[in-house]
Amino acid sequence: MKGEGPTGDIAVDEAYDGLGATFALFWEAYQRNSIDDAGLPLDATVHYDQDYDNAFWDGTQMVFGDGDGELFNRFTIALDVIGHELTHGVTEKEAGLAYFNQSGALNESISDVFGSLVKQKLLGQTADQADWLIGAGLLTSAVKGVALRSMKEPGTAYDDPVLGKDPQPGHMDDFVRTNQDNGGVHINSGIPNRAFYLAATTIGGNAWDRAGRIWYNALLDPNTRANTDFAGFARVTIDVAGRLHGTDSAETTAVAEAWTTVGVI
Ligand SMILES: [Zn+2]
């Protein structure tokens, strides 16, 4: 499906628009030609399985569930979740961050960062105007919560009798050691997420411009590898900011201070 009009199937149309918005962010902001930077056509399957409460990148395409309708709405509803899943393809192609422990939480955070930037860019929001939520609209009205995660205030996205409380920490003091969730990849990602939020709002303007470019170049930097941890990635972002803007620049200072505020360096 390329350049066609609406189909009347809302999940198809949302998936199509989400794939297009993700392509637009990477192309317009970073001159990256699709997930593989070689023009990979972006395909998606919708209505996957029955009442399926997730969306994922299977290595070649996006797959979306319809949600169970009780806790979760259809997964195409959240543009940043589409951007999140596709960014896993970019990370796999570039740094190849291993999907467990800190490198896995960093992998998750990179997906949240660019997922949020897809949404911010489409809406034309500055860093100050953005909600910094991941998956707003995904939880049904029966759930006490606003989204899956908050990059601004990790741990505050939901607090519900059925779903439980958002377990994300926003500081290394609260880092969660667990064998579940591949070593807490969806939990501890709150820490680097908040670092990006802090850097982007301190730098100001459109987050995809300077802060996003720093994170993007850091993801492509040879010093970001499969086993890179939070502190290792922090050092790469500071190096990249220094090369782009100067070591004494406001941007580099903002990035370094962000990582210090969340206790990583
Ligand atoms: Zn993910």
Image (cartoon, helix red, strand yellow):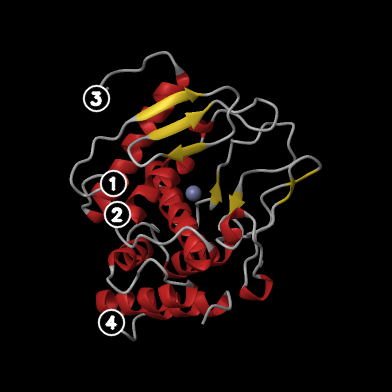
State which tag comes first along the sequence, 2 or 1: 1
| Location of residue 229 in the rendering, given as x and y in whole percent from the top left corner | 47, 72
Residue at 56%, 49% (x, y): give it: 133
Q: Which residue is mark 4?
A: 246
Q: Which residue is mark 1?
A: 35
- State the CA–CA distance, disc 3 to disc 1: 17 Å
Q: Secondary structure at mark 4?
A: loop
Instruction: Tell me what residue is drawn at x 49 percent, y 79 percent.
Output: 257
Give the x, y percent position of residue 57. Answer: 41, 40
User: Closer to us: mark 3 or mark 1?
Assistant: 1
Give the numbered dot on residue 93.
Answer: 2
Q: Secondary structure at mark 2?
A: helix
Q: CA distance from mark 3 to mark 2?
A: 24 Å
Disc 3 marks which residue? 2
- In front here: 208 or 45? 45
Amino acid type at circle 4 is: Gly
Count of numbered labels shown in the rendering: 4
